[in-house]
Every structure is written in C-alpha cells, then in structure tokens.
Image (tube, rainbow, N blue to C red):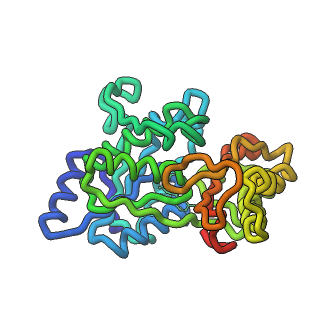
Amino acid sequence: MAIEVVGTTAVLRARVAAARARGARVGLVPTMGYLHAGHQALVRRARAECDLVVVSIFVNPTQFGPSEDLASYPRDLEGDLVRCEAAGADLVFAPTVEEMYPDGAGGQRTWLDVEGPLTGGLCGRERPGHFRGVATVVAKLFLKVLPDVAYFGEKDFQQLAVIRRMVRDLDFPVRIEGVPTVREADGLAMSSRNAYLSPQARAVADCLWRGIEAGRAAWQAGERSTAALTVAILEPIACAAPLARTQYVELVEPSSLEPLEGTLADNAAVQVVLAVFVDGTRLIDNARLDAVPGAG
Ligand code: AMP
C-alpha cells in the first residue's frame, strides 16, 4: 500500500518538514477513524487543494464524558487505510493515547477552552467538557502537523464554529475549511456512530433529516414563528418515538450559534441544529432552514 502510516510525532514532523522543504502545501483532516464517505469527502477536498494530505486517526479520550461510548467507539484501522488511500491521502497519523497524552489523558494539565455562547449551548450544554477536549486535541494536532489548511465537516456544526473561533482567537496560521454533510440515500447524515444502529433503529434514523425537511417546508410556506417551526421539525421525530427521543432541537444564528426566538425576519439566516437519541445512539444533524430544500 502506497499510503504511509506513522504513529509518532517525531516521524510525522520529519515527513511534513521534508514535504514542506519541497514547497508542499499541507492539508490536515482530523478524524476519529471508522471512516465513511463523509470523511472521504474531506480527504478528497484536501487532495484537490493541497500537495501533502495528512489524515489523523485518533479516538480522543478527552472529548468523551464518563458515561459516553469511548470504550465501544468503532475502530477499523485496516479499512480506514483503504478508504484514506482511495480518497487520495498521503499520510495517516495514527498515534496511541500515550503518544498524544504522555502523562495519560487524565494527566493532561493544559486545556484549550473556547468560552461563551459558542460552547455554552447545544452539544456543549449536553456534553460538559466535550469541546474542551476537542479544542485541545485539535490544537495539539495543529502544532504537530502545522498544516496550511485543515478540513472539518459541517455535520459537526458547533465543532466547526468552535475550531474557527479558536483559530481566530489564538492566531493559528491555519485556514479552516468546512465541507458539506454527506448523507445516506434517505438523508441520514453519515456518521461512524451509525454502526451502532440495529436494523429497526436504522429504519427510523432518517427522522432527523425528515425533521429538517419539515422545517424547511414550513419556512418555504411562510412560517416565521420559531415555536411553530420547531413544532414542525419535531413532528417526524415524534412519529419515530419511542425509538427516537429528542435531546434538543434549536434554531440558531449560523455564526454565533445564539438562539433565535420569536418571529423571524424573512431574510433571517437560520440554522436548525438537533440531537436525537435513536435507540440509545446519539445522532446529531443540522442544516440551514432558509436554504433551498434538498441542499446541505
Ligand atoms: P469524526 O471522525 O466523527 O470525529 O469526524 C471527523 C471529521 O469528519 C469531522 O470534521 C466531521 O465533521 C467530519 N464528518 C463526519 N461525518 C461527516 C459527514 N457525514 N459529512 C461530512 N463530514 C463529516
């Protein structure tokens, strides 16, 4: 296999430095592995725009809460390498926990915290410490790879906003590119966690997308009340109960993620963000409500 897998920061830095000495533009795609076509879209975009494409595969323990799925998170390094190569990656950085956290994840004493409404609501509210873990590991990866560009999926909409803010606040010399969400035929956003779904759960897991489409249809029909739009979005999810259970559905301003309430202006930019447990598996999705139906 032509693709190279490196496990240590020292070798990673040597490879990136050699490429940079040749004038290469370096792209980084951070992932937790168990790759699917969504991840591959990020890699393909990096391939199109960069000379050296680095994919990191690391299930980051510090972004999981104590009762979350760190131990059971799906892993398949061999399959991931095939998918990375097919999408055009040059180098896979697959470190151990000890390589990323020499004193162990519990021994980390320096954290990167993005404060304020960007992390105070939505997944930040439901998963305390999650974005601290994400920002810290992404900062570590940036400092190891020193990429020119880093690629993140719009599927994790709040994460993308947090990373953009971190880069702006700390002047990381990295351009952040967001990549549209890749979906299954029925609209379900691709996710490594979809592997947890039983056939029965999978059959109703498109309720998040159907909720988004119902919200878009209501918007198109002229509905501007956030309460009524939210009711429309919740309806297909309620139909999938008791297998589906909503954690949150919110309408937010797309850049600040500030909640939108009351009656919206016709030209309002509206992002719907939602988290739903489907048979115990927590799925998230989001889309512009005021966009053309079927897009994003
Ligand atoms: P993860 O492995 O889940 O941490 O995801 C790694 C990167 O892939 C993140 O930037 C995600 O937002 C992105 N990603 C995950 N699923 C999708 C998808 N369905 N479409 C586009 N990007 C995705």
Examine the image and state in which quarter residue 24 appears: bottom left
The residue most toward the left is 21
Examine the image and state in which quarter residue 69 appears: top right
Percent from the top left, x then y, of residue 171?
Answer: 26, 49
The quadrant of the rendering that contains the N terminus is: bottom left
Which residue is at 37% across, 59% downward?
Answer: 176
The quadrant of the rendering that contains the C terminus is: bottom right
Examine the image and state in which quarter residue 269 appears: bottom right
* Viewer-closest of 291 and 147: 291
**On screen, 111 above or below 252?**
above
Is residue 196 shown to the viewer in this render? no
* Residue 12 shown left or right of residue 216 in the figure: left
Percent from the top left, x then y, of residue 257?
Answer: 54, 49
* Residue 231 shown left or right of residue 31 in the figure: right
**On screen, 62 above or below 57?**
above
Which residue is at 32% across, 44% downward?
Answer: 139
* Residue 163 shown left or right of residue 19 in the figure: right
Q: How many numbered badges does the structure rendering display? A: 0
* Viewer-closest of 233 and 181: 233
Is residue 223 shown to the viewer in this render? yes
Percent from the top left, x then y, of residue 284?
Answer: 63, 50
Percent from the top left, x then y, of residue 267?
Answer: 61, 67
Which residue is at 67% across, 46% downward?
Answer: 275
